[in-house]
Image (cartoon, rainbow, N blue to C red):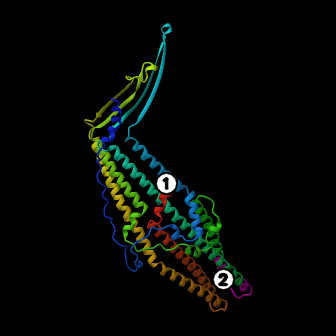
Amino acid sequence: MRRAPLALAALPLLLAGCSLAPQTVLPTPPVPQSWPVGDAYLAQSEAALPILSYTQIFTDPRLQTLVEQALAANRDLRTAYANVAAARAQVRVTRAAQFPAIGASAGAGYADRGAGGGSGDFAVQGGITGFELDLFGRLANATEADRNRALATEAASRTVRLALIADLAGAWATYGADRDLLAIAEDTAANAREAVRLTRARLDGGIAPRTDLRQAEQILATAEDSIAQQKTALAQDENAIRLLVGGNVDRALLPATLAEASAGIAAPPAGVRSEILLRRPDVIEAEYRLRAANADIGAARARLFPAISLTGLVGFASDALSGLFDGGAFNWSAGADASASIFDFGGRRAGVAVSEAQRDAALSSYEGAIQTAFRDVADALAVQGTIAERVRAATANSEATADTAALTEARYRGGVDSFLSSLDAQRSLYSARRSETATRLLLAQTRIALFRALGGDSGAGSDTAAR
């Protein structure tokens, strides 16, 4: 009889339930087996893509310092990590229902009967209360669903981490480009001031009309307006970097020019088969959500069957403190009950249908995530395949317009060309230099986009998220 409580406690372990969840079968990735090729794409030669660390792509120590600060202090990333912790705790909450809850209670009392003396009693009880035997795997599948949702949440945190690094690198490069644009505006303003001075002198000497002076003043006013705009843009760039980093930023860590910024951003390796996108954190998240939806089907199917609950009680009871541990003091009891809904208007079957529909939606989301990832990489590769030619053309255009502006100004001073020709040449030079800066910024942004699209550094976030 004394072995009966132990056997009762071990009964749930002997009745390990089966699972009614269907097996998760991942579909064949709905994308081509290789990247597109053609004039717009670079020749592909590598057979595999290594897992990238942001330090391999963002090689400038100043940018690496900013990234480290952001990973430590960015509020969005902290929120993502907190969500991971909450999801993991929820798994433990759900899993606890698979095991019996054991409780204990004790009580003592004494009654004074006057001359006849008194009597006391003491009782200790311990028991298993309200434990459901998971014969059909409902609780196990619910735990599995929450576990996969927790893993999906962790993958989502890696997506946040990846986006944070890429956004910070983009803001850093944009700051360098705006520094260049400010320098262009200041050069244009300096040239315009000299033009205004010379034109005013020619006007005073009766050589140039007043319209030439007014046109020169227009160029100067436009350049001064651009200077003010670029100073605003630089301040906003610093604000964006400060928000991403999560605190104040040392200006010594910011690039002085776009050339500086671009030199610290390497091109990610390309030329891999499209299966590599299965490592992107958003694709991993979609896969775990698909697995969670599959487990939900098993839990919903288990609700179609009876629920069997088990209660047990083991303890000591005595009417007198002195006889607490006598041979007859130990007692135990056990009971079980089963319940099943006879008619629920199809509610439980509808629950299974809901879970199956959610599984189908999760499957479509998983395939869509793969297709989106493929397009992101293909688009970035298309830009990278032609950006070098665009930079070369923009540079050649700037050089040609600069030479044209110098020649036109010399011809104007020599009385060969009108002042309008000189002004048009100055406007063309200003536009060409800005266009070249925009193209060079696009080169840096394309490398950053490839880093993000390929899921670079996505595996490095799991360790951080686990802290």
Kind of residue sitting beneath label 1: Ala
In the displayed structure, 112 sits above or below 99; it is above
User: Is 73 on the left or on the right of 19, as rendered?
Assistant: right
In front here: 303 or 316? 316
* Tag 1 and tag 2, C-beta contact below 8 Å: no
User: Is 233 on the left or on the right of 320, as rendered?
Assistant: right
Q: Is residue 134 visible?
A: no
In the displayed structure, 312 sits above or below 14; it is above
Element under disc 1: loop
User: Is 370 on the left or on the right of 222, as rendered?
Assistant: left
Quadrant where the N terminus lies?
top left
In front here: 129 or 240? 129
In the displayed structure, 276 sits above or below 206; it is above
Furthest-left residue in this view: 342
User: Is 90 on the left or on the right of 165, as rendered?
Assistant: left
Q: Earlier in the sequence, mark 1 or mark 2?
A: 2
Q: Which residues are magenta?
A: 200-219
**Residue appearing at x 49%, y 74% in the figure:** 267
Q: Position of residue 238 (x, y in %)?
A: 61, 64
Q: Magenta segment, principal secondary structure?
A: helix
For disc 2, the marked residue is 212
Marks 1 and 2: which is nearer the front?
1
In front here: 198 or 156? 156
Marks 1/2: CA–CA distance: 69 Å
Q: Position of residue 264 (x, y in %)?
A: 56, 73
Element under disc 2: helix
Kind of residue sitting beneath label 2: Asp
For disc 1, the marked residue is 466
